[in-house]
């Protein structure tokens, strides 16, 4: 406990024992708790200016053994008195937390009373603040933050691994879907090619007016379908008995001279030949038109099929290229995700190892803390035993003081008894004097009444002649008044003497009370100073042990932090190397896959171009052959027409010659 100064002695205080005085001192201490709260907040500036801790008592020191006073506090072993001032670098919150924990531990052991809680808190804080620096608490907070961050990174790595696994599964599904789409595109292309082939093999039906022509696909070079001209002499007459005539001569085959009946037959044969030639010409024209239409239809259909096939092929190629690009990107992404997943797994494993190592170190630190706590408990037990022994010795020493106090109390009781007896005698004298005054007043009243009654009777008996004179009456009244005044003066003198005696007794009683209070206060103050000194020593020893524990913990934490930092740097270096290796490997794999895919695409494009080139060359060759065939057909047709015209001209000339001959023959006949 600490005293803010000796309180002023009041005349109204009562009590004659040391516990009552101690209670009064505790009440004055508890009344200053509000002031100590404010002073504890501003103690850093005051301590920094003064260079020494605040004194627990502002008054004068009561003895050389007291811990209070303006002098410095006892120095803790291993510490420096100059370093006990609170530094502005000290963080207030951790010191307050540690102070509250120490105070709660001390209060749990019931070492001090609740009224001394503020002084205890102030002393613990004044001891702890120079020892605990800002850097140590920052290191502790940094290590706890790094541990929390490592746990967060581990959880994030696990989440990333699960996400990468799910993305890899999604990419596998996408790649299978792309393969399925490419297979479907190939199937569609095959089906389109089969449909094209079947469409080319199916026959076509063309209508030319009332005629219907069926066109079948040609797989080889077909011959000319135009029939040969009628042979000479192959025309048959209208009747079954008509002789065969030559187309050129118009004469019967077996005769050499014309007859008159044969002229009509020759004309009819010529007309029939003309009709046949016309019919043959029309048939040839129809065949040529049919073939031309067939060729045009084939060309149009082929062009449409080629355009459609080219479009489908280009669309399929584009789709395949896009799907291949997507598959390539998906494969690359899957590879990167796989590498990232492996890296994340490696990081997770490293984090798990680091976590296990940290847990092992934490378990070791906890074991060391338990050992330190056990040692602290042993030291506390030893200190408690020593304090109990010291208290037993001090109790033996204080037994003599208690005997002296008992003797003083007995003397005080005797004085009080004597004072009470004196006051009783004074009160008895006062009562006697008051009784005498009362009796005198009664006698005076009786005298007054007796005088009045006597004078009345004398006046009645003597009559008017015997009445006393006025001066005599006045004299008697003056005597009675003087006697009454003397009795009043005596009464006032007795009362004044009584008051003086009473004041004297009160003064003696107050002096005796103050003397007793002073002696009791000195004894209680001496006892309180001894208790305060012992209490401060206990607090300082407890704070010193706690500071040693905290210092050892901080040193251990710093060592662990340095080891963890080195481990983290090594892990980061390994992660960086693994990431660089993974990136190089992934780039090489992606480049190789890209080159392979480019080669495949180039080969496919070259094969498609070669196939298209072959088809184009075959089409050009076919068109050239068809054009040559058409030219040959036209040439043959022109030759045939020229031959027919020549034959017709010859026939006409022969008919003309035969007609002339027949006319000559007729003339001969005539």
Image: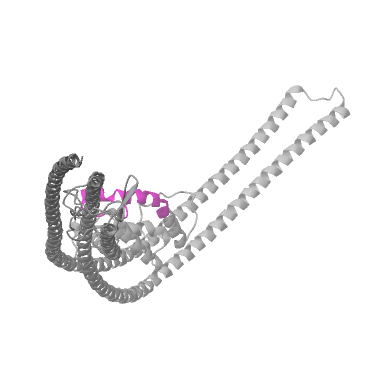
Q: Nearer the viewer, residue 520 or 554?
A: 554
Magenta residues (range)? 28-57
Magenta span dominant secondary structure: helix
Give the x, y percent position of residue 211. 33, 48
Question: Which residue is depicted at the point 68% across and 47% down?
Answer: 435
Q: Nearer the viewer, residue 86 or 576?
A: 576
In the rendered structure, the answer to whether residue 506 lies left or right of residue 283 reads right
Identify the image quadrant of residue 458.
top right
Residue 92 lies in the magenta stretch: no
Position of residue 2 relative to residue 271, above or below, is below
Q: From where the camera sits, is residue 76 visible?
A: no
Give the x, y percent position of residue 627. 13, 50
Identify the image quadrant of residue 622.
bottom left
In the rendered structure, the answer to whether residue 65 lies left or right of residue 438 reads left
Q: Nearer the viewer, residue 347 or 275?
A: 275
In the rendered structure, the answer to whether residue 346 lies left or right of residue 203 reads left
- The quarter of the image holding the N terminus is bottom left
- The quarter of the image holding the C terminus is top left
Position of residue 170 relative to residue 428, above or below, is below
Number of labels in the image equals 0
Residue 36 lies in the magenta stretch: yes
Position of residue 560 relative to residue 457, above or below, is below
Give the x, y percent position of residue 240. 31, 56
Question: Which residue is depicted at the point 14% across and 50% down?
Answer: 633
């Amino acid at each position: 406990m600490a005293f803010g100064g000796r309180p002023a002695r009041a005349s109204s205080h009562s009590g004659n024992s040391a516990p009552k005085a101690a209670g009064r001192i505790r009440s004055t201490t508890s009344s200053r708790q509000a002031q100590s709260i404010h002073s504890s907040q501003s103690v850093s500036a005051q301590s920094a200016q003064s260079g020494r801790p605040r004194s627990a008592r502002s008054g004068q020191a009561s003895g050389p053994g007291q811990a209070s006073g303006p002098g410095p506090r006892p120095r803790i072993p291993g510490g420096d008195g100059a370093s006990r001032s609170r530094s502005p670098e000290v963080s207030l919150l951790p010191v307050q937390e540690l102070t509250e924990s120490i105070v709660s531990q001390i209060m749990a052991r019931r070492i001090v009373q609740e009224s001394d809680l503020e002084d205890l808190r102030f002393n613990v804080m004044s001891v702890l603040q120079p020892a605990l620096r800002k850097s140590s608490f920052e290191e502790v907070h940094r290590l706890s933050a790094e541990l929390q961050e490592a746990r967060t990174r581990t959880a994030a790595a696990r989440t990333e691994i699960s996400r990468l696994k799910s993305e890899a599964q999604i990419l596998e599904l996408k790649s299978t879907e792309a393969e399925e789409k490419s297979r479907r595109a190939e199937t569609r292309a095959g089906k389109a090619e089969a449909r094209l082939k079947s469409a080319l093999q199916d026959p076509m039906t063309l209508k030319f007016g009332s005629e219907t022509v069926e066109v079948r696909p040609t797989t080889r070079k077909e011959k000319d379908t135009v029939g040969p001209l009628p042979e000479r002499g192959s025309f048959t007459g209208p009747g079954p008995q008509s002789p065969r005539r030559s187309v050129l001569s118009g004469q019967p085959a077996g005769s050499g001279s014309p007859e008159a009946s044969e002229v009509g037959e020759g004309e009819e044969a010529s007309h029939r030949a003309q009709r046949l030639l016309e019919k043959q010409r029309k048939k040839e024209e129809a065949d040529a038109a049919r073939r031309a239409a067939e060729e045009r239809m084939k060309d149009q259909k082929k062009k449409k099929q080629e355009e459609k096939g080219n479009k489908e092929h280009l669309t399929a190629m584009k789709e395949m290229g896009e799907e291949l690009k997507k598959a390539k990107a998906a494969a690359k992404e899957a590879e990167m995700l796989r590498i990232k997943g492996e890296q994340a797994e490696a990081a997770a494993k490293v984090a798990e190892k680091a976590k296990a190592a940290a847990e092992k170190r934490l378990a070791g630190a906890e074991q060391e803390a338990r050992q330190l706590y056990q040692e602290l408990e042993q030291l506390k037990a030893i200190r408690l035993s020593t304090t109990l022994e010291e208290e037993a010795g001090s109790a033996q020493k204080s037994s003599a003081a208690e005997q002296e106090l008992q003797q003083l109390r007995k003397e005080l009781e005797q004085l009080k008894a004597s004072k009470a007896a004196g006051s009783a005698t004074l009160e008895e004298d006062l009562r006697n004097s008051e009784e005498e005054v009362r009796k005198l007043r009664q006698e005076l009243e009786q005298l007054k009444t007796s005088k009045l009654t006597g004078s009345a009777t004398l006046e009645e008996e003597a009559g008017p002649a015997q009445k006393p004179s006025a001066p005599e009456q006045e004299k008697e009244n003056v005597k009675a008044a003087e006697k009454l005044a003397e009795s009043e003066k005596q009464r006032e003198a007795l009362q004044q003497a009584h008051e003086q005696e009473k004041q004297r007794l009160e003064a003696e009683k107050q002096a005796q009370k103050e003397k007793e209070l002073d002696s009791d206060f000195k004894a209680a103050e001496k006892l309180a100073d001894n208790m305060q000194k012992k209490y401060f020593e206990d607090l300082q020893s407890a704070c010193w042990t706690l500071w040693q524990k905290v210092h050892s913990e901080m040193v251990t934490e710093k060592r662990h932090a340095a080891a963890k930092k080195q481990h983290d740097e090594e892990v980061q270096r390994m992660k960086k190397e693994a990431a660089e290796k993974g990136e190089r490997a992934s780039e090489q794999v992606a480049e190789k896959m890209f080159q392979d895919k480019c080669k495949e695409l180039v080969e496919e494009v070259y094969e498609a171009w070669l196939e298209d080139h072959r088809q184009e060359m075959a089409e050009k060759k076919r068109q050239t052959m068809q054009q040559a065939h058409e030219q040959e057909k036209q040439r043959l047709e022109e030759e045939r027409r020229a031959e027919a015209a020549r034959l017709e001209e010859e026939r006409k000339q022969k008919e003309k010659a035969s007609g002339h001959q027949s006319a000559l023959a007729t003339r001969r006949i005539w």
